[in-house]
Amino acid sequence: MDEETTAEEIIKGTDPALYLAIAVVCFAVIFVFIQIRKKRKSDEIDSFFSNLDGDKFNLQLPGSVDDYYEAKEKCEKAGWEPGQSSGAQPSPHHRALAQALMKRCIDDIPIVTHIQRESPGMNKLYSQSMCSVKQWKSYQAAEAMVSAEVEEVRAEADEIEPGWSQVIWRQAMQYSQMLKQKEEQAKKAQAEQQRAIAAQQAAANEKNNAEKAKYDAIKAKVDAEKARLANADQAEKDRAAKAEKAAQELLKAEEREKQSKASFGGKGGMKKGFLG
């Protein structure tokens, strides 16, 4: 009873401000915890969009671009002048420069198609504020580089052959597809060849295993027959030895019997004793 009274007095004597302070502290702790979780989640989202496809637009022009300009410089030093039609008989310099530009154009196809494929998605993400500024700027820089390359190739095409700019990219796409198909066919042929070699090797291994199994079976039979013959020969030797031993023992027994008879018999019969 005294303990209950003491507890009630303590409770009544507690300052209500203490409860308020405890409640404020708890609320502050919960609030800080929620804010930390929100910030962490926001940072994770920002990091996700910032790092999303980080290297997707880190594009570089192919080395054939520099190769083309080197070839162009050599042709110009050799007397080739831009803007002149090749006519019915193109010069070696004209032909070499046209080949260099076509190679450049074909090598550009992967980055051109990459930008064309990614452009709708990036514009949609940007319009919905779902991509970072860094990623958007990276895409814009890549798109500008590719667009400048497309126009530059067209300008160079017209310098080599007036009007070629209208069809050079279409031709390059066709050549690129042909080369891709050829590469795929080569890979397919190589894969088929590897499968054929593997099948031949498997058949050879199977044949070798079958022959080895056959040899092992024959060898096992031969070894078993040898063992049987060896056992039979040993058994025959053992029987002969036993027979020899029995005969020797029989002869010894007969000899002992003769000696025994000789001891008690003889020419005069049994010897007389002192009673005889």
Image (cartoon, grey):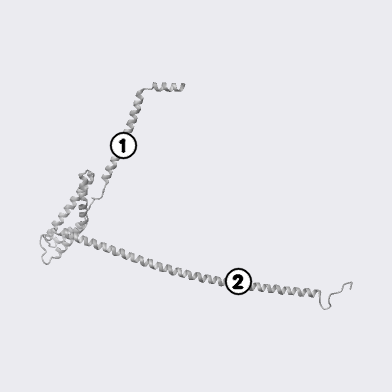
Identify residue for label 2: 235
Around disc 2, counting alpha carbons within 10 Å, would you say few (fewer than 14), some (14 to 19), or many (20 or more)?
A: few
Of labels 2 and 1, the one closer to you:
2
Q: As shown in the figure, which amino acid type bears the numbered disc 1?
A: Ile
The disc placed on residue 36 is 1
- Whether residue 221 sits left or right of residue 164 in the image: it is right
Viewer-side residue, 59 vs 182: 182
For the residues bearing labels 2 and 1, Cβ distance under 8 angstroms = no
Around disc 1, counting alpha carbons within 10 Å, would you say few (fewer than 14), some (14 to 19), or many (20 or more)?
A: few
The disc placed on residue 146 is none
Q: Residue at x 17, y 52 (%)?
A: 147
Q: Earlier in the sequence, mark 2 or mark 1?
A: 1
In which quarter of the view is residue 238 placed? Answer: bottom right
In the image, residue 46 above or below residue 257: above
In which quarter of the view is residue 149 placed? Answer: bottom left
Residue 91 image offset from top left, x and y in percent = 13, 65
Helix, strand or loop at disc 1?
helix
- Whether residue 159 sits left or right of residue 60 in the image: it is left
In which quarter of the view is residue 75 placed? Answer: bottom left
Q: Residue at x 77, y 74 (%)?
A: 259
Q: As shown in the figure, which amino acid type bears the numbered disc 2?
A: Ala
- Whether residue 143 sits left or right of residue 36 in the image: it is left
| The furthest residue to the front | 1
Q: Residue at x 58, y 72 (%)?
A: 232
Helix, strand or loop at disc 2?
helix
Residue 168 image offset from top left, x and y in percent = 15, 59
Residue 2 image offset from top left, x and y in percent = 46, 21
